[in-house]
Amino acid sequence: MSDKLLMNESSSSNYTAVYPSDGMRVLQMIVIVMIFIVGVSLNGLVIWALGVRVWCRNRGSTRETQSADSFRIYVVNLAIADLVLLLRTPLMLPYLMNHFSWTLGEPVCKLAIYVRCLGLYTNAFFLCTIAVERSLCLLRPVWARMKRPRWAVPLTCIAIWVLAAVFASPYILTAKIISWQNRSACIENDKEVGHALIVVETLAGFLLPLVIFLSCNIAVIVCTKKAESAMTSPTSSSGPGSTSQRLTRLYRVLFLTMLLFLICWVPYFTCRFLRALSHDQPKLKERVIAGAYVALFLVYIKSALNPILYVIATPVKCACFNFCHDTGV
């Protein structure tokens, strides 16, 4: 895989590949197995608890508000997107067990790169929809609760999956296997098409979602600050203690979501973008490929931890409605 091979395939006569030691290779396999077990278990639990179980319980029922239902649907789709990304990790094990040599053939190589891109795009898009949903429930609570068409959320989810599949599909054509120092490597094409795909991936799959994600979370913080001021005013009938506790919990969740997003995604996409700019600088390219490989583990860790963060955020979001209802925000 392109993220895993520390070399520059365009200058094979001048460079010697540098591979991690056997100890690091074994450590990588252990980390991959742990990420896979934890991530699949937690995301599978979210899909069952918030998806299958709730759907079976609420069939034909109208007890759940549209806003609560929409948030739950987005979280379930995010868990599915995380599963898509995490189900790619077992394909890394044969690569590592064979001392950094790809032995699964070109079709699986194309599938591995496609699944990675599909998982990244859907993750970014659903993180944005959850952030937008959270801000809507505060800024437009009546519309989000009662006036929004019921088909809007399912249609949004379908559109996101289709759009992500379209963005990821060109990688099927650019993925290939090359021979390198008695090893086989599954890589992406580093020609002009490959560079263009990385630029599109950086813009559509990272920078735009990052702006939307941070903007919505900042809007929520501003709105809740306004709610906090109103609820602690002399004319407010709400208890300041409970209000302070709920807001503190909300701020913690928002801070953790933004911090985790920045720590786990910024390094990977920075290295990917630098790779597109380093085609004439072999040493820099070698370093950014190595950096992207390490940063990809952070992306996997985030996908494994997302269920904890967003399941915690579900009751916090419900508390936000109480702020808006009590204060008229």
Image: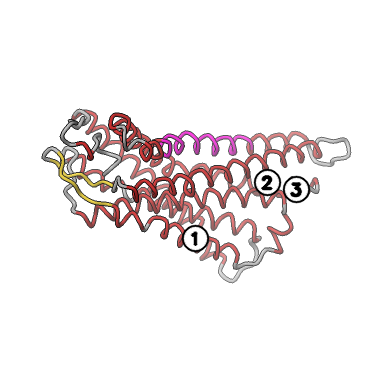
Q: Residues within 10 Å of mark 3 (few under 14, many from 20)?
A: many
Q: Are marks 2 and 1 in contact (CB under 8 Å)?
A: no
Where does the image place residue 31, in percent across and percent down from the top left? 31, 36
Residue position for label 3: 324
| The label number, if any, that marks residue 319 in the structure image | 2
* Number of marks in picture: 3
Q: Is residue 15 left or right of residue 223?
A: left
Residue position for label 1: 53
Q: Residue at x 54, y 55 (%)?
A: 74
Residue range in magenta is: 251-270
Q: Is residue 68 left or right of residue 127?
A: right
Where does the image place residue 158, in percent across and percent down from the top left? 50, 64
Depth check, front residue: 34 or 6: 6
Q: Is residue 268 magenta?
A: yes
Amino acid, disc 3? Cys
Q: Residue at x 58, y 62 (%)?
A: 153
Amino acid, disc 2? Ala
Amino acid, disc 1? Arg
Q: Is residue 174 magenta?
A: no
